[in-house]
Image (cartoon, helix red, strand yellow):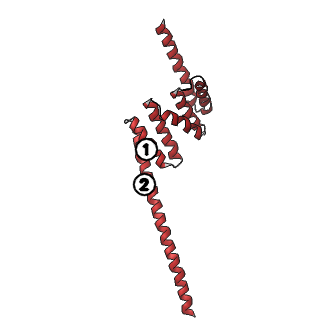
Amino acid sequence: MINFIILLLSIQFYYSQDRGLSSFEKKDYKQSYDYYLNVLKTRKNDISAKFGAGISAFKNQEIETGIKYLQEVSISEDKVLASKAHFNLANIYKDENKLEESIHHYKKAIELNSKDRDAKINYELSKRMLAQESQESQSNQGGDEDEEEESQESQSNQGGDEDEEE
């Protein structure tokens, strides 16, 4: 009898989580988010529901809310979900062009799940993007200095030309 009850509760839990996922897969992010919030009313520490709420909120353009939930999941004891949370945080930060934060979260995702190929690829790509940005920034700063020097030389040459005409 106890085994039957455990089986019944397990099935109910699986299918209840599946409704949020089902809405998410149908791209009904609002319904998915609302579902996970409802789950969290009764199970405040449900890491899976927080993960679902975070991803759904992000997809529903509630970026800060999504980040908040994903940050909670990223420090959980569940290494698989924590790794996925770090991966998604990294993607969010990459989209916001916050490459250093993005790289940090990709690295954490890899530390928690060394087999995560997508995190490894995105980590390397983000490092290259940051290096390229840094290089372009240095080039632009060097270019600005050259332009200032040329402008100063041009002004002093113009001043010199005026002196010669008098």
**Mark 2: secondary structure:** helix
Question: Image quarter for residue 164?
Answer: bottom right
Outermost residue, top direction? 1
**Front one among 74 and 85:** 74
Separation (CA) of disc 1 from disc 2: 14 Å
The mark nearer the N terminus, 1 or 2, is 1
**Front one among 86 and 77:** 77
Q: How many marks?
A: 2
Q: Of discs 1 and 2, which sits in the foreground?
A: 2
**Residue 43 in the image: above or below residue 59:** above
Residue 6 in view of the camera:
yes
User: Badge 1: few (under 14), some or many (20 or more) residues near its Cα, within 10 Å?
Assistant: some
Q: Residue at x 46, y 67 (%)?
A: 142
**Front one among 142 and 129:** 142
**Residue 35 in the image: above or below residue 67:** above
State the image coordinates of residue 89 (x, y, percent, origin top left): 50, 40
Q: Amino acid at mark 1?
A: Asn
Residue 116 in view of the camera:
no
State the image coordinates of residue 162 (x, y, percent, origin top left): 57, 89
Residue of label 1: 122
Q: Residue at x 48, y 64 (%)?
A: 140
Outermost residue, left direction? 114
- In the rendered structure, find residue 131 and report the number of the disc placed on it: 2
State the image coordinates of residue 78 (x, y, percent, origin top left): 45, 29
Say whether marks 1 and 2 touch (CB < 8 Å).
Answer: no
